Amino acid sequence: MAEDTEPNADPSMEEILASIRKIISDDNPPAEAAPKEAEPAPQEEVLELTQVIQEDGSVKDVNAPKEPVAAAPPPPPPPPPPPPPPPPPPPPSPPPAPKAPAEALISEPVASTAASTLSSLANTIEIERLSSSPSSATFVGNGRRTLEDMVIELMRPLLKDWLEKNLPTVVERLVQKEIDHIVKRS
């Protein structure tokens, strides 16, 4: 190798390649130095792919005629088919017709007047709502009420109760957390 100017310096790429070439040339002597006739290497017994080594170390030929094997027992009979499914149950009988109340709480004319007034109010509200709501609303049931309206109606009291119970605690906790955060930064 080439001499380095510093004793701890890493060898250069040329020095590494020169060292590798030198090692390779030392391992492979020139062709003139090799004997003219090489002696054949002693032959080991070659195991062919058609041979198997037995447990006792002997070699057996796989292609050799095999000894007759006793006839295999017949396959078991197939399992019996599953039983047919039971017939479907008969449809339920219709519920009995509602019985007329023995005595109505209000008279027939009062009931019809109240029904027509409530129907008129519902129609007016529906017309107003349809004129102000987007046309992409999903109507439920008879087409007068949207799913969104139903959810709002059901969630409003639940949300109000939850906020009344939990909002002061949540706000207090978040304010305290922010105060602690500001104090830690200072």
Image: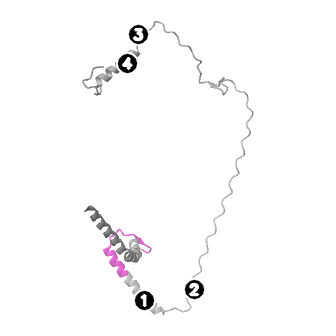
Q: Position of residue 34 (x, y in %)?
A: 43, 9
Q: Residue at x 40, y 7 (%)?
A: 32
In which quadrant of the rendered view does residue 118 lie?
A: bottom left
* Picture layout, residue 121 above or below residue 169: below
The secondary structure type at the circle numbered 2 is loop
Observer-nearest residue: 21 or 66? Answer: 21
Q: Disc 3 marks which residue?
A: 31
Residue 53 position, x and y percent, is 63, 25
Q: How is the image coloured?
A: one colour
Who's the residue at 30% across and 22% down the image? 15
Question: In front: 8, or 77?
Answer: 8
* Residue 104, placed above or below residue 80: below
Which residue is the site of mark 1?
114
Q: Mark 1 belongs to which amino acid? A: Ala
First along the sequence among labels 4 and 2:
4
**Residue bearing mark 4:** 23
Badge 4 element: helix
Snapshot quadrant of residue 93: bottom right
Quarter of the image with the N terminus in it = top left
Mark 1 vs mark 3: in front = 3
Amino acid type at mark 4: Ile
Name the residue type under label 2.
Answer: Lys
Quick check: 154 left or right of 39?
left
Q: Which residues are magenta?
A: 123-142
